[in-house]
Image: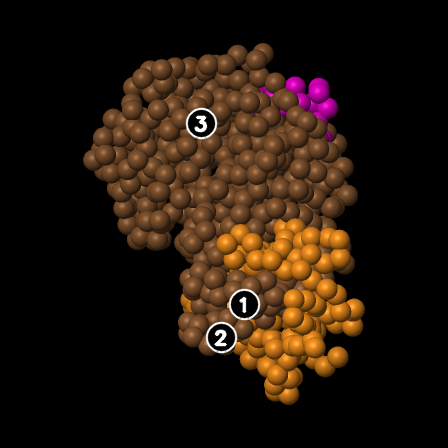
Chain colours: A orange, B brown
Amino acid sequence: MWMKKRYLLRTPDGEHRAVVARQGDQLAVQLDDGALRDVDAVVVHNGRALSLRIGNRVHLVHLSVAGPRGEVTATLLGRPLELTVLDELHALALGAAGATAGSGVVAAEIPGLVIEIRVREGQTVKRGEPIVVLEAMKMQNELAAPCDGVVASVTAQAGRTVNAGDTLVVITPSAG
Amino acid sequence: MTVAGRLPFDKVLVANRGEIAVRLIRGLRELGLHTVAVYSEVDRTAAHVLLAHEAYPIGPAPAAESYLRGERLIEVARRAGAGAIHPGYGFLSENAGFARACEEAGLVFIGPRPDTIELMGNKLAARRRMRASGVPVIPGTDEAVRDADTAGRAAAEIGYPVLLKAAAGGGGKGMRVVRDPADLAAALRQTMGEAKSAFGDDSVFVERYVEDPKHIEVQVLGDGEGRALHLFERECSVQRRHQKLIEESPSPSLTPALRAAICATAVRTAESVAYRGAGTVEFVLSPAGEFFFLEMNTRLQVEHPVTEMVTGVDLVRAQLDVAGGRGLRLRQAEITQRGWAIEFRICAENPRRNFAPAIGEITALMEPAGPGVRVDSGIAEGCRVPIHYDPLLAKLIVWGEDRPRALARARRALEEYILHGPIHNIPFHLWALDQPSFRDGTYTTRFIEACFDPATFAPPLAPDDQEALLAAGALFEAARRMAGTLAGGPDYVAGAPGRESALTNWRRAALRRMTGRD
């Protein structure tokens, strides 16, 4: 009898559902509404990669833990994928709390100096619009709005240094 | 017998870090020379330190307190008994004061004479000198403009659009394009202000702005006594904010006649200043096929491997020959271009987020190999990319018999590259390889600005590859969770950096159990 476990895979481009199923010797994976496919998965490179045989194809995927909450970096053919793997209970809980992939928080990814803030509270912004200019690693970098919306609050101040993870600007995403 | 026996020094201090320090140490070791590395507090386990014969700490992480402290570097060289210093690129490589201080301390500075560095470091002085030598320069003022009226007259004569440029600037800083005469006064004020605060010198000059140019540069070698030769050109038009990302040699844009003219001009430039050592003369190639001297870089450049792969000349060795008094060991007629080389700068930058720099521990690294593949790397698995220095981690250089084969090899090598930890720009390079204007060689310095969209650029995977990638992610996490809950297993500390190896065996065991392979 198949033992199945469901997961939610969150990537920068969206979400996918995955079902990992096992029955004795056999392993199978189903993604989204696709078919349940037999998989032969072997750990190689001293635990760093999986060689997957699906159908007639073999695929070599390198994997590393990228964070403590199911964050994984997976690379295939030079394309790194930053994904977060959540088991279905966790995913349901997140859904109920209303967390969305399109969060409007603009935070500093690394420590730096705030050079310029290009928006004000109440201003409508579009996804991709430059919001804050930070200086780090000898260069100036523009951080862009992650979604369409309205600026809810500006906590950054020009001329002040910030640490990684510091919230700079919060945007209320617009509906739809 | 090694070359070392014929040089006036047997020990060289490498005043740099990262991939170039590794490249230099390798080259110096091959010549039989003793190598001295220097390291800041965050670089004790950096690749260049591990490879050197001797290593000395030089200060806290910030460059200004370590790699830029010239007097400390000279003191370390003396203490180590080094007879020469190689400055690499960046840092103090184009600091005339440092070059002078080395010479005054009795050390050989592997590079040009201090006065050459000074001349070429001042863009206005360099332009004047080049114009006087008959080298075509971009139409522009030879003196700084101090007020809007002077600037306005100059701009009217040159013709709009014009570029306001800081004389002491470089790397694309302190530049502003003005298309409308009405904007000139304000633009001049802003540029002068920026120049003053960034370089301590508010001299700004006005230059014709060449729209949509290609960036062509020529590698030169000079013996310091008036003779120079060229090692052909490189095209470096894939740039973002004047930072190069992809370079190639030959340039797909030059006819043989144009190539001969540009290379001859570069030689004339080097000979006019009796250039000593390795240098690069940079040109702007306009859409109409006119070329103009832009500036001369008086150092070994990041992209030098591309020239090495195509000409077969080891530029570090050539630098050591000149610095050691052995002169140029080559004749121009012996230098030819064979095949095609392309370099991709592998940087800790996130192309999705406007190339924002990234840091972090490198949790997995596998560099590509195979025929025609060269990786100049400053990183290793387990090392941390610090925030204090620029984000260049490594360079991938491929060589092919012709451009199409080099492009195919580039794709193959990039697809083999594994780098986990800090976000990197390999997907950008895969994207560039797919773009029509890059494939046919017509790309200009506006390539990224015109074609790259961070939201949609991600290089696609075939459906079954995409499926495998996601499936692997799910299986990996599933196995990890099982490992954590196995009775008698170690405490499950999910994914803390550095704990990876503790989970490895458990993950393996879990997957074996999952696939029934016990």
- Identify which amino acid the numbered label 2 is placed on: Leu
Residue B40 in picture, x, y percent from top left: 32, 49
Q: CA distance from mark 2 to mark 3?
A: 55 Å
Residue B303 in picture, x, y percent from top left: 54, 35
Earlier residue among tags 1 and 3: 3
Residue at left offset 62%, top offset 65%: B515
Residue B160 visible from this viewpoint: no
Q: Secondary structure at mark 2?
A: loop
Residue B320 in picture, x, y percent from top left: 39, 23
Q: Are marks 2 and 1 on the same chain?
A: yes
The residue wearing badge 2 is B486
The residue wearing badge 1 is B510
> Residue under mark 1: which chain is it in?
B
Residue at left offset 56%, top offset 54%: A44
**Which image quadrant for residue B239?**
top right
Q: Are marks 2 and 1 in contact (CB under 8 Å)?
A: yes
Above or below: residue A76 compared with residue A90:
above
- Majority secondary structure of magenta residues: helix
* Quadrant the C terminus of chain A occupies: bottom right
Please report the bounds of the magenta region as a residue range: B251-269
Front residue of this view, candidates B44 and B187: B44
Residue at left offset 34%, top offset 20%: B4
* Quadrant the N terminus of chain A occupies: bottom right
Front residue of this view, candidates A171 and A62: A62
> Residue under mark 3: which chain is it in?
B
